[in-house]
Image (cartoon, rainbow, N blue to C red):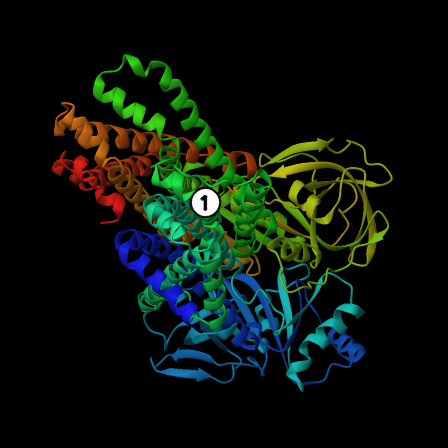
Amino acid sequence: MQKLLKLFYFVQKDLLSQKKLNSFFVFNLVLGFLGFLLLQVFQVSLDQQTKNKAQEILGGDIVISARRLINEAEVKTIEDKVNLQFQKRAKSTDFFAMIKFGEQSRLVLVRSVGDNYPLYGNLEIKNSDGNNATLIKIMSGEVYVDPELVDQLKITDLKTANLKVGDVDLKLEGVLTSDPSRTFRLGALAPFILISEKDLAATNLVKAGSTVTTSFLYKLNNPAAADSAKTELEKNYLDPSLRFSSALQEEDGGNRVFRYLIDYLGLVSLISIGLCFLCLSYMLNWFFQVQKKTIAIYKILGMPDTTLLKVQVLKNLILSISSFKIALVIILLSLAPLQSLLDNYFKIVIRLTISPMQIFISFLVVVIGPQLIAIPTYLAAMSMNPLILLRQEVSQANLSRRLMIAWVASVALLFWGLAVWQSHSIQTGSVFIFGLLAATVVAWLFISSLRKLTALFVHKFNFELRYAFLSLIRKPGSTDLIFMTMTLSVVVLTLLPHIKKSIVEEVRPEVSSKIPSVFMFDIQMDQKDELIKIVKEKVGQDLDMTPLVRSRILKINDQSYERVEEQGFFKTRESENEARFRNRGVNLTYKANLQDSEELLKGKWFSATPGEMAEISLEEKYAERIGAKIGDVMTFDVQGLEIKGKVASIRRVRWTSFQPNFFITFQPGFLEEAPQVYLSAVNQINQEQVRVLQNAVVDRFANISIINVKQSVEKSLVFIDQMALALQIMATLALVVGFFIFIILINTQVGERINEMNLLQVLGSTQDQLYRIMITQFSLIAFLSLLVGLGLGSLIAYVIMAVMFKLGIYFDYVSMLSLIVVLVSLTFGVLKVSMRPLRNLQPLALLKNEGGLVDGK
């Protein structure tokens, strides 16, 4: 007990004697971990809400669904085969369709439901009288809609409003205010309407080959048996077109886009942690240099190295825990305004909470990270000779090569593990770490080369410039650290505007004449010719029809193509995507030529004359996911008929073209007789022509769905703006950390060089000269950081958009100019404040051996 008290005495003395240094330490950690803790709150809140409301979000304990019609006989066979025991069953059918109100028409997502819907949760509505109510049962002849549809159609009187859905007129009975099955609705393509299953046939909207999703939802006798029931269903039915979902396992209850956003926000938050650790490494070395006399005295007085190590570890532990507590309090105080931002701006219904588990995990990161970073400093303190220190010689850590490699590997492994964990993707996490390391290496090579090059010409400069440059050249450690932290911060802030602008310019119809104004689907074979005439009459364009044939893959090279079971505690986004691609039916098309949106990468295009086996072309990413290559033979089930195709080519598809694009394209001559529907697109027409065309098509063919591409893109751009704001906030936090490091490094450099500046003043330099020397030195680093950061950020944006995603790159020069103005202003403000000690130099301090900031005063 006495030893422990003595240990705490030394720790307390150490903490109190270095208040300013310890404050820097704590503030650095708080800034670095704020973003990390915040993302933990988002991730856990999303997962917790999905778990707590899993049955409501999914719609049942078990759901059997398919992207096609499922009849009662088929589902009864499935139920009997696995002996599914349930209390209630509900059915829903989802599809896109056009609805009319007066002279206006809109694309909507229609859901027709039976009597028992919903099995879990409540549908909350505002009825035609304006009162809030719970929808118990949807009666025939009624329709309920999203609030946004009321605004779009400018419906002012709900009591008298009727919507034409297909061939029937339905009375608008209320507006949906809460639907548990649609908790997350980011960037929805169309508003949602709810009708009775009894009206579905009368609408005449669902025909053979229509794009529909049929779901049978079950409330089991024993909800805890949902997982075993799902497993049994998957064992007995390997057809990937059927999907079996369990409320206990469903990972996609939250919107996938929102999950990906949080994944990437998590990666940006890791940049803050990385910069924080980088600064921490410098600060710990600074601590050591400041305290080396004290450490020497302790050693001379007989303090064992183990006790010295315990004091340092305990001190860093106390500072780390204090930092964690402060960051946690800030996060807790921020929950209310963040909740308001989610509710009012992002329109996402998530109750932000913080759990003991996420606190514990974050605590481990906060504690383990600094201790790993401090290892070289610990070893330096234990291995130094106190007599050398008393002679004012510099002590460095005597790490062996093997120990240094082990230390670097440990830190890198920790950071890589955090990246994979945050992104839920080994590929994304690894690419992120590689990109970060590559940017760091490039920045280091640049500043190192520039330092060596400058050394060759520095003698030609005047005194002030020569001294400023020599200071940078002779202090490579601090110079490199300031440069790299500032550069990486600027890289992150530069990336986002470029990527956002590239996406916006890629999908905005006004800037791309190849993007259509209208996209139509679910066109039946007997409607094709008349639709071509309508389009020619209304907008004067010839319509090209693209066939769509529904099928499923049976085999690849005689190997059964069966569903993938998603197992394991930690699922990566890649495994989820692979399972999603395999566990679904496929749509086929056939055509003789490539479209403008396609590019042949490997193999050759189809022969003019069909052979015995069809030639097929696969989209490059799809081919990778299913493991197919040129020469492979794929077997398809097309409406009960087996058709084989040989992979003849791999092609790239520009999906943002909004053209009818497919993963699998057949050679003409093999699918023409199969049941099929058609897709088509109408190129550049104005919004009045779009309105006229929509109304004409809806009046004649109610089942044909029409997407107003401009409206859809505008909604997507709003969503992109929201996502960009979230990323910008996290990137700004990284910049704040970078600026804090900049402030710390300037203060330490000024503090360490007070004696040097005093000596220069004794030798005849004026205070203004010394001030200009220091301003020049750090302004140069800041300018180079900004220049290289902007260049690297633009280069990485080009690699991401043009090389990885094969899209056009558009640089956002306005944002870059704004960034330059802000950063330059902040930099000079920081420099002006940090240089104040140079205005109060006291040469007599040389005689007193005062160190000012070096002593932590």
Residue found 69% across the figure and 48% down from its top: 625
Q: How many marks?
A: 1
Mark 1: amino acid = Ala
* Rendered view: 105 above or below 438: below
Judging by the rendered image, the residue that carries numbered circle 1 is 380
* Quadrant position of residue 172: bottom left
Residue found 14% across the figure and 33% down from its top: 843
Residue 98 image offset from top left, x and y in percent:
50, 60
Q: Is residue 781 left or right of residue 501?
A: left
Q: Is residue 567 left or right of residue 645?
A: left
* Quadrant position of residue 55: bottom right
Residue 791 image offset from top left, x and y in percent:
40, 30
* Rendered view: 853 above or below 7: above
616 or 844: nearer the eye? Answer: 844
603 or 624: nearer the eye? Answer: 624
692 or 184: nearer the eye? Answer: 184
Residue 355 image offset from top left, x and y in percent:
46, 72
Q: Secondary structure at mark 1?
A: helix
